Amino acid sequence: MRLITRTLALLLTGFWATVSYAQSNYPDKPINVIVPFPPGIVDGYARMVATKAGAILGQSMVIKNQAGAGQRIGTDALAKSPKDGYTIGVVTNAGVVSGPALATNVPYDPIKDLSYLNMIMEAHYLINTHPASGIKTLGQLVDKAKATPGKLNFGSTGMGTGFHTATEQFVKNANVKMTHVPYKGESPLLTDLIGGQVDMAFSSIASRAMAEQGKLVMLAYTGEKRSALLPNVPTAKELGIPHVSSGWLGFAVPAGVPAPIRDKLIAALTAAVNDPEVLANFAKGGGEPRSLSGDAFAARVKRELDEMRELNKELKITID
């Protein structure tokens, strides 16, 4: 019995020594980064930060795009990845908030199955109408919607998307009723908004070019403070409409990755987000850098998930 006990003790000592060595020498090979959407502008932000973080860690970060199902395919792949720190992933509120709150049969739990590293960027929305509407301010829009409940409509980029849920949140907080018209993407949405087929729509800040051409009227910005790109556009909060959600971008690992490895990743990503080149790139596109990490990031995800589920008790949105 003593021999068995001594043997087990030696085996456990060797095991923990191996684990400790692996953690202290992390990373000693390239790190895979799952991106749950196709190449594009947002993918570019993730690649830049990952490249900077990889250089800080002394290993390359290899991007693997796994798009589909509103980002749920890639997010599920991340949740089911090995817990060794060699697979991390990009997460957004579409994959860990809207999807789990609104979709049926989501195969992962965004709270239990993921461990959150850093939120790196937040992207707020513009609230627009078209020139022919005669509406010049957000207050006028709200007044008109209250005077004609359900007659004004708003467009979105599709059922359950960030544009849709953020607009529904705005409608609720403004205490008005409007009719939802879903589109398949921002381009057809803005085409019909310009043409007056819809009365109001949220859009990305990139649409400011259309407003500068006189095709749209920017009523408000949904950030906590005014955008440096649009200093003359008031925030919804300034105008009495609190807490309109935004889109955001961050990184996570599967739950169970050892704390020392998580800490190294968080430190590298934090430094990467504060790199001058990254900050300039975000500012150019209207994104606001965020360095919300660890437990604080996880708490934000949980709060938004709870809020979305509560909102959906009224809306009863179901997405496939």
Image (cartoon, rainbow, N blue to C red):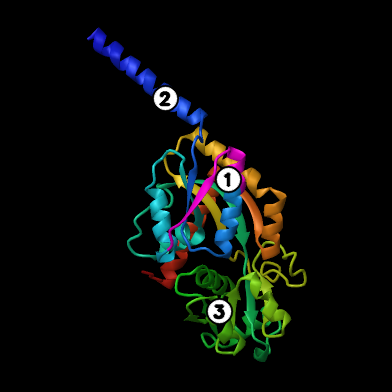
- Please, is residue 209 above or below residue 196 in the view? above
The residue segment tinted magenta is: 52-67
- Answer with left or right where residue 319 lies relative to residue 38: left
Which of the marked residues, 3 or 1, is nearer the chain's N terminus? 3
Which class describes the residues within 10 Å of circle 2: few (<14), some (14-19), or many (20+)?
A: few
What is the residue that sits farthest to the left in this orientation?
1
Q: Amino acid at mark 3?
A: Ser
- Answer with left or right where residue 3 lies relative to residue 171: left
3D distance between C-alphas at marks 2 and 3: 53 Å
Which residue is painted at 33% across and 19% down in the image? 11
Q: Quadrant of residue 205?
A: bottom right
Which of the marked residues, 2 or 3, is nearer the chain's N terminus? 2
Residue sitting nearer the eye, 37 or 305: 37
Q: Which element is circle 1 on?
A: strand
Which of the marked residues, 1 or 2, is nearer the chain's N terminus? 2
Which class describes the residues within 10 Å of circle 1: few (<14), some (14-19), or many (20+)?
A: many
Report x, y in % for residue 38. 48, 63
Report x, y in % for residue 226. 73, 65
Q: Quadrant of residue 7?
A: top left
Residue sitting nearer the eye, 51 or 272: 51
Report x, y in % for residue 222. 64, 67
3D distance between C-alphas at marks 1 and 2: 28 Å
What is the residue that sits farthest to the right in this orientation?
232
Give the residue number, with chain letter if any, for mark 3: 187
Give the residue number, with chain letter if any, for mark 2: 18
Label ID, residue 293: 1
Residue 289, can we see it? yes
